């Protein structure tokens, strides 16, 4: 198997971790997974071989833009999950 990953996955997971740490009520793993999937579907793919390669090739401005896009996508996904929790969805 090739050793590649989507850079946005790490950024979304990091954002969710920060939100969970700051939350009065912890986000359940299922909610985090739902939010991550919805957020990642709103973001463009950005594949890399490893984080070091990506870190070297991303400038500060581009990283800030990517981080902001992740914040917006996660916020929108959180609202979507809160408005329509898993127990109210047809799976």
Image: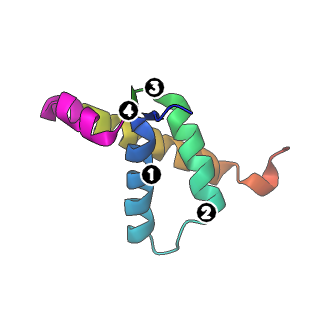
Q: Sequence order check: which comes first, mark 3 or mark 1? A: 1
Residue at image location 45% in from the left, 33% down from the top: 4
- Which label sits on residue 45? 3
Q: From mark 4 to mark 3, how far is it between C-alphas? A: 13 Å
Q: Are marks 4 and 3 in contact (CB under 8 Å)?
A: no
Dot 1 lies on which element? helix
Closer to the chain start, of discs 4 and 2, is: 2
Residue at label 2? 29
Write down the residue under mark 1: 13
Give x and y (percent) for residue 49.
38, 32
Alpha carbon of mark 4 to alpha carbon of mark 1: how far?
18 Å
Name the residue carrying label 4.
Answer: 49
The reply to whether the C-beta atoms of the residues labelled 3 and 1 are less than 8 Å apart is no
Front-lying residue, 63 or 25: 63
Residue 56 or residue 61, whichever sits in front = 56
Q: Quadrant of the C terminus?
A: top right
Whichever of callouts 2 and 3 sits on the residue coming sooner in the sequence is 2
């Amino acid at each position: 198997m090739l050793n590649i990953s989507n850079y946005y996955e790490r950024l979304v997971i990091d954002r969710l971790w920060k939100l969970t740490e700051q939350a009065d009520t912890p986000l359940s793993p299922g909610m985090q997974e739902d939010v991550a999937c919805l957020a990642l579907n709103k973001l463009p793919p950005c594949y890399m071989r490893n984080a070091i390669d990506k870190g070297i090739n991303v400038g500060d401005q581009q990283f800030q833009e990517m981080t902001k896009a992740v914040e917006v996508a996660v916020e929108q996904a959180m609202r979507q999950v809160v408005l329509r929790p898993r127990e109210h969805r047809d799976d």
